[in-house]
Amino acid sequence: MDQFKFRAYNKNRKAWDYFTPSNLPMYIQTLTFHNLEGNKYCLSTQLFDLKEKEVFHKDVLQDKMTGLKVVVEYGEYETRVGTGYGWYLALLEGGAAYTPLPKTLETYELIGNVIIDYED
């Protein structure tokens, strides 16, 4: 990654705030990725959807070829041949199917984020 980029949902403004390590508050810089997740911070994948929108952790994508809706996740996941670790796609509904995040998202459209669209 060239530079880490984060965003956090500001409930008061109902908008995303964007950060890089240089402009995050000092206490945030010492947290691990998993601690940031608990605070509703999302790390950029540095990939873009078919409409050139940047894709972040917890974003919901829809595959325009299959219609499937998936969530961008980070961590350990199961594959047919074993366990993987890193960015992956999980089905939004209906099961625990996982696939590693593709190198391009040219067939996926960003349609939301589970933090603001699917959580209380």
Image (spheres, rainbow, N blue to C red):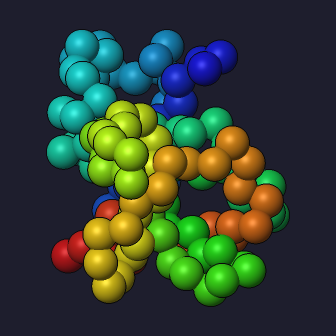
Horizontal arrangement in the rendering, residue 84 relative to residue 46 (left or right): left
Q: Give how far across and how far down residue 117 sits, in percent.
A: 38, 76
Horizontal arrangement in the rendering, residue 38 relative to residue 110 (left or right): left
Quick one: quadrant of the N terminus?
A: top right
Position of residue 112 relative to residue 7, above or below, is below
Position of residue 52 relative to residue 110, above or below, is above
Of residues 37 and 11, the one nearer the viewer is 37
Image point (38%, 51%), residue name: 79
Q: Give how far across and how far down residue 100 sits, in percent.
A: 50, 48
Of residues 110 and 65, the one nearer the viewer is 65
Count how many numbered circles sit on residues in the image. Answer: 0
Residue 57 visible somewhere in the drawing: no
Image point (46%, 17%), residue name: 21
Residue 91 visible somewhere in the drawing: yes
Hey, which quadrant is residue 43 in on the image? Answer: top left
Horizontal arrangement in the rendering, residue 13 relative to residue 106 (left or right): left
Image point (55%, 48%), residue name: 101
Image point (39%, 75%), residue name: 92
Position of residue 38 relative to residue 99, above or below, is above
Of residues 25 and 61, the one nearer the viewer is 61
Hey, which quadrant is residue 107 in on the image? Answer: bottom right
- For this orientation, the residue located farthest to the front is 81
Hey, which quadrant is residue 29 in on the image? Answer: top left
Q: Give how far across and how far down residue 120 sits, in percent.
A: 20, 76
